[in-house]
Image: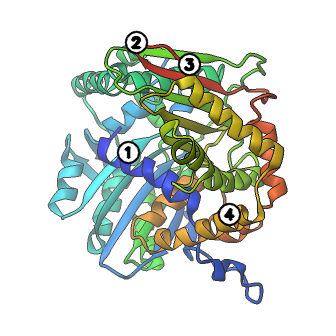
Amino acid sequence: MRKTFFKIAFVFVFLGLMHMGISSALAKDTNTAPQKVFNAKTRKLDNGLQIVVVENHRAPVITHMIWYRVGAADEVAGQSGIAHFLEHLLFKGQKHEQLGTLGPGEFSKIIRSLGGEDNAFTSQDYTAYFQSIASQHLETVMTMEAGRMRGLDVPSEDVASENKVIQEERRQRTENNPGALLDEQMREMLYANHPYGIPVIGWLHEIQALTRDQIFAFYNQYYAPNNAILIVSGDIKAEKVYEIAERTYGILKPETIPPRQYTSSPPFKASPSITMKDETVRQPEFKKIFRVPSFRQNKEKSLALQVLEEIMGGGPSSRLYKSLVIEQKLATSASFSYRANNWSDSTLYITATPAADQSLLKVQAAIDAELRKLVKDGITDEELSDAIKRMQAAAIYARDSLSGPAMVIGYNLITGSTLDDIEYWPRDIGAVTKEQILSVAKTYLDPDNPYEFPPVTGYLVPEAGEEQ
């Protein structure tokens, strides 16, 4: 997992992806047809590669992204971490008869020498690679990226050395981070018998056991043009992108991709909780994770959850922050976040940091009280109207960004949305009703009547601390 870009991508999902929209006037003008957010153009090559282009001629730069429909959830049982490991190896060398040969690290060196930047990230459902660079170098980028789609060439000794790098990454980010360990174990409980319960980076003992043959088998099976989406955003004409794609990606042959079949969790009656104690913890934290529908699974419910996220967790004026931090002064922070873009079930997080003189259980009780109020009384007309206006207005920034469209479109398409779902999101979010929001709140967030997959509660405390 490439560190800098992962952080940027993560923030963008929650601050941009879920709030992308255009001005309320554009979205609600009933006298004209709904306007598209990005006006993206798309085409599919004969080998199955989908191409999406968003033209933006404000500056002579482009963002090129290739998204693969494969991630950690597609790994063979017992081989966790392969998808993330493979992401690392794609920077370690490639050899293709028609598209050229690059040695370890040479891909990124060429990008930097041309004044650009590149990176990659892995999730449960996808793996993505990107380059931001002057538009005149697009063909160079596409040639190299197409070359490593089917030409990965990494010696065994480099695979072994990179394995040690990934082990150290896991130790630094997870093993030595009690908050990350807590989150990892909470997700394992929430997604029992489901691949989302396995961390993207993998379990340490399984990472250590991964072999070159296993990794390359995974690569050969999934890294193919008919299992990918190419998105180019910036100062380039769509026809030019299609032309270059034909002579780079277009020469690659499609592969037989196995159907995606995730294992399912059985329903549970217990409401689990977990406490993480560690001497390095300086500030206790309360977490609660709910399992809710993704956009692909249920568009109507997902849109309602997105609006509810804005009402409950959209900044200092949101219900949760206002109640816990400003009015009751029980916490120094409070958040409510929902991620719509998963292939399978999605997650909704509620977190809070108690004030110095308050306990985690008091904070938990206050959060449950807010949820009971929501389930009983719903939301007001004013809350709904204000939230929708804020969300629609926020997409102006996504539309005007040079790299943002590639991110937004990629995250959505790769997890099952259509291009129309993305382009007409402002219209759809504007149609969400109070009744729909009340329905999802009652189904998934009622503290007294848990869903068939009950939420998992987590307490992060110092070594000598208690939840109380």
Residue 159 got which mark?
none
Residue 6 got which mark?
1
Residue 205 got which mark?
2
Pointer 1: residues within 10 angstroms few (<14), some, or many (20+)? some
Q: Secondary structure at mark 1?
A: helix
| Residue 248 appears in the rendering | no
Q: Nearer the viewer, residue 40 or 144?
A: 40
The three-letter code of the residue at mark 2 reads His
- If you read the primary sequence from the N terminus, does the residue marked by circle 2 or circle 3 appear first? 3
Distance Cα–Cα, label 4 vs label 2: 41 Å
Pointer 3: residues within 10 angstroms few (<14), some, or many (20+)? few
The N terminus, quarter of image: top left
Q: Which residue is mark 4?
A: 421
The three-letter code of the residue at mark 3 reads Ala
Q: Position of residue 58 (x, y in %)?
A: 36, 82
Q: Write down the quadrant of residue 290 in the picture.
A: top right
The three-letter code of the residue at mark 1 reads Phe
Q: Nearer the viewer, residue 274 or 56?
A: 274
Task: Determine whether label 4 and label 2 are within 8 Å by CB.
Answer: no
Q: Nearer the viewer, mark 1 or mark 3?
A: 1
Q: Nearer the viewer, mark 2 or mark 3?
A: 2
Distance Cα–Cα, label 4 vs label 3: 33 Å
Compared with 72, 328 (above or below) is: below
Q: Which residue is mark 3?
A: 77
- If you read the primary sequence from the N terminus, does the residue marked by circle 2 or circle 1 appear first? 1
Q: How many marks?
A: 4
The three-letter code of the residue at mark 4 reads Asp
| Residue with the most extreme bottom position | 31
